[in-house]
Amino acid sequence: MDSIRSKETSAFLEELGALHRQLAALPQDYDFDSPALLSHVLHFAAQPQRLRDYARTAIPARIAILHHSWTMTTQSLIDAFLTGMEHRNPHSILLAARAQLELYALVTTVIRVIKSNAGLHEDKFIDRVLAVDEALINATFGTRYPGAKEQASQLGMSRLRKPNEADMKLFDAINIITRIKKAAVGSDYPTLFQDYELLCEFVHPNWGTNTLLVVPSPFGEPFRRFSLTSPAPFEGALGLAVGPMYRGAQGIWSTTRKVEPPFGWSDLVQLVKHRTIDLPNRATRRAARRKLK
């Protein structure tokens, strides 16, 4: 059956397998202490040193959490894709590829905010730290489920202040189509939106879904056959999905490995790539909390 695959499809599969092995070789668990769910940038706006301390502690901590979430989710999505291949399930690989592109779009747009606002120079420092902090908070806690905001508020969102209307608005997830269109502009993946739309056509209850399993009937014209035994539907889906799956996964891995805290980091927070972080001891963490209060 592999003989009907194109050389491009086979090459993408080989690269995807190599990336999966690379991710699977990393530590598979990560412990972290989450920063406040709210931004404290404006709270420290009149205290320059405390604002800089916040920028060098809370921001790197948020980036570390997202870095691990993004790379572990990518590994899990590749697992789903490869499991779909094992069972020759066209829907599994199409769904995994579409989810991977959604994650790629979020990562790309957030990393752009981080890079475009980086630097310790005084010019618009408060605005730049706020832009990064809010982008990270939205990327972490953004939701379309109304009950999630209520659950978050019950957990206690900050020890320094109560949430306001703007804070709660920040918990509204940005529409994924908006992120995808923005991510495609000026990126290494200019066909991102077109690939995403095509994948959606085959996982939404549209024409694509209704024809995905259709093959010629052995009874000849004018008959067609819905088939779960023919290799054609799976191989067709694989040809559509493997390129976007690899581009999205590799794009996330290569991007997140290079991201640096935009305002540096303090001795209390050591962000290290490849899913490792030097967690301060308990006494040091308590000192850090007191310093930021």
Image: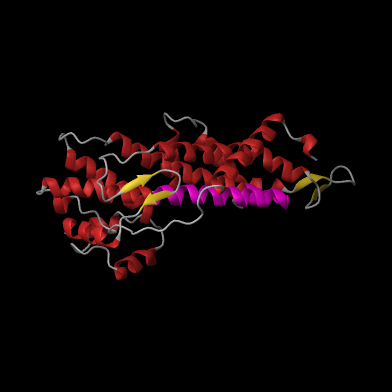
x and y percentages locating residue 97 in the rendered image: 58, 45
Report the front residue among 121 and 90: 121
x and y percentages locating residue 226 in the rendered image: 78, 51
Coloration of the structure image: secondary structure
Note whether 154 is above or below 76 in the view shown.
below
From this viewpoint, which residue is outermost toward the bottom? 154
From this viewpoint, which residue is outermost toward the left? 46
Residue 14 at least partly seen: yes
x and y percentages locating residue 187 in the rendered image: 44, 30
Q: Main secondary structure of the magenta part?
A: helix
Magenta run includes residue 78: yes
Quadrant position of the C terminus in the picture: bottom left
From this viewpoint, which residue is outermost toward the right? 219
Q: Image quadrant of residue 9?
A: top right
Q: Residue at x 33, y 68 (%)?
A: 150
Quadrant position of the N terminus in the picture: top right
Magenta run includes residue 83: yes
Residue 206 at least partly seen: no
Q: Is residue 1 left or right of residue 143?
A: right
Q: Is residue 141 left or right of residue 94?
A: left
Q: Is residue 236 left or right of residue 272?
A: right
x and y percentages locating residue 171 in the rendered image: 33, 56
Note whether 81 is above or below 128 in the view shown.
below
Magenta extent: 65-93
Note whether 27 is above or below 107 in the view shown.
below
Q: Residue at x 20, y 36 (%)?
A: 120
